[in-house]
Every structure is written in C-alpha cells, then in structure tokens.
Amino acid sequence: MRLRAIITIDIDAADFVDAADHQRRIESLLGAMRDSYADAALEFRERRQVRRGMSPGSPPGGKLSSTGKLNSYVD
C-alpha cells in the first residue's frame, strides 16, 4: 500500500526576506522529518491573494450575465 501525507502551511510574509526566513525554518523541520521519511519533499511556492469581494474565476468586470449568454453576437 502506498500513502501520501500532505501538510499545508499558509504563511503571510511581509517581503521576500521574510519569505526566505520562513522557507529556511520549514526546510530545517523537513530535515528532521527526513530522518524517519527519507523521501520527504518540500514544495514552497507563492500564492496570489484573491481580491476581497470577488470570487475566484469571476470575470475582470466582476459581473456575469444572468441569462447565461457569454458573448454578444451581431447578425
């Protein structure tokens, strides 16, 4: 049987220096985990924040047509 454990940590960093400090701290914790789990891996990436008042995937104008019509067509 093969299992995968995922640990998610969302971090708010003030700048790249602060982000690098968090990354170093997490990498040191990962080093301790590798004593027991040699194949442990770390993926560290930037996430974009969603603007307040808008849901993910909403159009730039912020308004969807209530009829379901996607495009305006001219005959």
Image: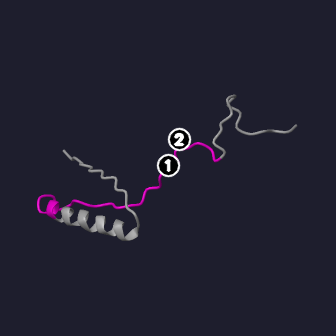
Residue wearing tag 1: 50
Q: Are marks 1 and 2 in contact (CB under 8 Å)?
A: yes
Residue visible at 26% across and 61% down?
A: 41
Quadrant of the snapshot with the N terminus:
top left
Q: Earlier in the sequence, mark 1 or mark 2?
A: 1
Q: Which residues are magenta?
A: 32-60
- As for residue 36 lying within the magenta part, the answer is yes
Label 2 is placed on what type of residue? Ser
Secondary structure of the residue carrying numbered label 2? loop
Residue extending farthest to the right is: 75
Please give the name of the residue rendered at 34% of the width and 61% of the height, measured from the top-left corner: 44
57 lies left or right of 14: right
Q: Is residue 11 left or right of residue 2?
A: right
Which image quadrant is residue 25 in?
A: bottom left
Q: Report x, y in % for residue 68.
A: 67, 31
Q: Position of residue 63 (x, y in %)?
A: 65, 38
Quadrant location, the C terminus? top right
Please tell me the numbered disc located at residue 55.
2
> How many numbered callouts?
2
Residues at marks 1 and 2, CA–CA distance in whole angstroms: 7 Å
Question: For the residue carrying disc 1, how many other residues have a C-alpha within 10 Å: few (<14), some (14-19), or many (20+)?
Answer: few
Q: Residues within 10 Å of mark 2 (few under 14, many from 20)?
A: few
Query: Which residue is rendered at x = 71% and y = 33% of the image?
Result: 69
Residue visible at 25% across and 62% down?
A: 26
- The secondary structure that most of the magenta stretch takes on is loop
Most extreme residue toward the top, as rendered? 67
Q: Amino acid at mark 1?
A: Val
Given residues 45 and 3, the one toward you in this image is: 45
